[in-house]
Amino acid sequence: MKFILKLIISAVGVILVAKLLPGVTLNTYLAGLLVAIVLAFLNNVVKPILTVLTIPITIVTLGLFLIVLNGIIILFADKLVDDFKVNGFFTALIFSFILSIVTGILNFIFKVNKED
């Protein structure tokens, strides 16, 4: 149940950020939910692999390269979901940053990460 609530909160975050950020297009609300599902998959399956493969550059940049990986994950989601478009890498970085903040605030408000 908590996973479904997190997906819904993430979808709401995607929809809000897509409406606020120029350069991001989301055609339907259902696409927002699909983007949330795709991002959950990519963050749990692809991102750990990319993180391990880029350990040297992550160490050299003192962890800042992980922000770049977040942008890459957003661009992957852009390619996988037809009704979701991001105009360029810099926009994907900003989208990722704002989405993290918005979903963090929503998770706090709805007490999703609270230990039961």
Image (cartoon, rainbow, N blue to C red):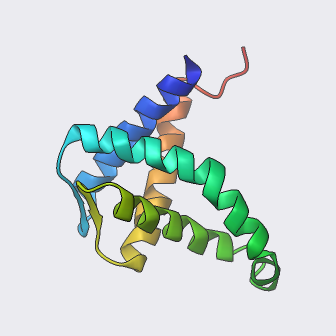
| Outermost residue, left side | 27
Q: Observer-nearest residue: 41 or 62?
A: 41
Q: On the image, which quarter does residue 111 sit in?
A: top right
Q: Quadrant of the N terminus?
A: top right
Above or below, 23 against 30 in this view is: below
Q: Observer-nearest residue: 29 or 80?
A: 80
Above or below, 61 against 42 in this view is: below
Q: On the image, which quarter does residue 33 sit in?
A: top left
Residue visible at 56% across and 26% down in the picture = 3
Q: Quadrant of the C terminus?
A: top right
Q: Is residue 43 left or right of residue 96?
A: right
Above or below, 64 against 7 in this view is: below
Q: Is residue 108 left or right of residue 12?
A: right
Residue visible at 54% across and 42% down in the picture = 104
Above or below, 57 against 50 in this view is: below
Q: On the image, which quarter does residue 2 sit in?
A: top right
Query: Where is residue 59 shown, x and y percent of the image?
Result: 82, 79
Query: Where is residue 15 shown, x and y percent of the image?
Result: 29, 45
Q: Observer-nearest residue: 86 or 42?
A: 42
Query: Where is residue 68 shown, x and y percent of the image?
Result: 58, 74
Q: How many labels does the image show?
A: 0
Residue visible at 66% across and 69% down in the picture = 66
Q: In this view, does 36 lie to the left or right of 26?
A: right
Query: Where is residue 34 shown, x and y percent of the image?
Result: 35, 42
